Image (cartoon, rainbow, N blue to C red):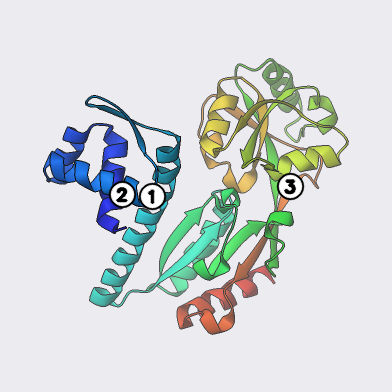
């Protein structure tokens, strides 16, 4: 199996048209068709349902496409990284971050002002990954919990949850009136436990920490919407389908959405505890060690 075969397969899968994909790739249609057929033969299964000139990904093809896109992205990143380093001797630090945490990004910005030569490769939303290898990251900021128990990290900070409510939701009028009467108003969990909620679900059994926190507070939320994406979570709330929780550090897009209002919660413990860990010292570069020392000095 060759990388070229995988690139050809992805092009066909995304266009679902052999002629169009061949034109985009700059090769003949017979050559492209032969490459895809060879790939299917090597895999031992068909990747497309064919009906004359019409082709469509089948279940096996969809699974292979997801993995192929990840593989090609990682390969392209590696090629870009080594070419950039060879030409400019630029080192890029790899940082994984839970959500789109603004405090973590602010910390990296402070470090960049101290070390102007630093370059970053940021991967946000790492809580959605089922199996994380710390050796892929110079620094990892992750939520405390069973999913990441294998890492020996340091406490970063507690990111408090906010309640996100759509402007058209029946709850909005009551909460807005309370906020107007008392600028320090905070929402009690007791007051909202009978509402319909939207939660982010990563994989079959992995929910965002807010769900477990609700259960810990004594109520099992009535879930109207499960989604695997932060943006879809925001849109569901903006449309008034449900209310939901969003960590303050990841709430930027919610604050900028004119159809959503954010309210603080009265329960100070209702937040996600974030941890930070690093590669083993012997695997960190000089710049990676400088980042580690800077971050640990900051959080201590």
Disc 2 from disc 1: Cα separation: 6 Å
**Camera-nearest residue between 282 and 33:** 33
Which quarter of the rendered picture does the C terminus lie within?
bottom right
Numbered mark located on residue 43 in the image: 1
The percent position of residue 177, horizontal first and vertical second, equals 72, 20
* Residue at 55% over, 35% down: 254
N-term mark: 2 or 3:
2
Callout 2 touching callout 1 (CB < 8 Å): yes
**Which residue carries the number 3 mark?**
271
* Residue at 23% over, 75% down: 87
The percent position of residue 259, horizontal first and vertical second, equals 54, 24
Q: Secondary structure at mark 3?
A: strand
* Residue at 68% over, 38% down: 162
Q: Secondary structure at mark 2?
A: helix
Which quarter of the rendered picture does the N terminus lie within?
bottom left
Label 2 vs label 3, nearer the camera? 2
Left or right: where 144 falls relative to 37: right
Q: Is residue 137 visible?
A: no
Left or right: where 40 falls relative to 28: right
Callout 1 touching callout 3 (CB < 8 Å): no
**Which residue carries the number 2 mark?**
39
Label 1 vs label 3, nearer the camera? 1
| Location of residue 211 with respect to 194 vertically, above or below | below
Judged from this view, the residue extending furthest toward the right is 218
């Amino acid at each position: 199996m060759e990388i070229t075969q995988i690139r050809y397969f992805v092009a066909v899968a995304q266009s679902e048209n052999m002629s169009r994909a061949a034109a985009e790739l700059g090769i003949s249609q017979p050559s492209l068709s032969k490459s895809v057929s060879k790939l299917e033969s090597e895999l031992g299964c068909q990747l497309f349902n064919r009906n004359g000139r019409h082709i469509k990904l089948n279940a096996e093809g969809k699974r292979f496409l997801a993995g192929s896109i990840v593989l090609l992205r990682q390969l392209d990143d590696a090629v870009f990284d080594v070419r950039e380093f060879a030409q400019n001797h630029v080192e890029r630090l790899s940082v994984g971050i839970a959500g789109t945490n603004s405090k973590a990004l602010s910390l990296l910005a402070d470090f960049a002002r101290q070390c102007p030569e630093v370059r970053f490769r940021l991967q946000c939303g790492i809580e959605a990954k089922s199996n994380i290898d710390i050796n892929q990251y110079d620094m990892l900021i992750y939520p405390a919990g069973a999913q990441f128990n294998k890492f020996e990290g340091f406490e970063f900070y507690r990111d408090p949850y906010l309640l996100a409510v759509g402007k058209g939701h029946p709850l909005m009028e009551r909460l807005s009136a309370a906020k107007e009467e008392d600028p320090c108003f905070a929402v009690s969990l007791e007051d909202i436990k009978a509402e319909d909620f939207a939660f982010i679900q990563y994989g079959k059994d992995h929910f965002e920490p807010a769900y477990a926190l609700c259960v810990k507070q004594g109520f099992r939320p009535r879930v109207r919407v499960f989604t695997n994406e932060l943006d879809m979570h925001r849109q569901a709330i903006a449309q008034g389908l449900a209310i939901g929780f969003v960590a303050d550090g990841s709430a930027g897009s919610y604050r900028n959405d004119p159809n959503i209002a954010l309210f603080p919660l009265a329960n100070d413990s209702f937040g996600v505890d974030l941890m930070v860990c690093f590669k083993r010292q012997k695997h960190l570069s000089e710049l990676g060690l400088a980042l580690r020392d800077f971050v640990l000095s900051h959080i201590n």
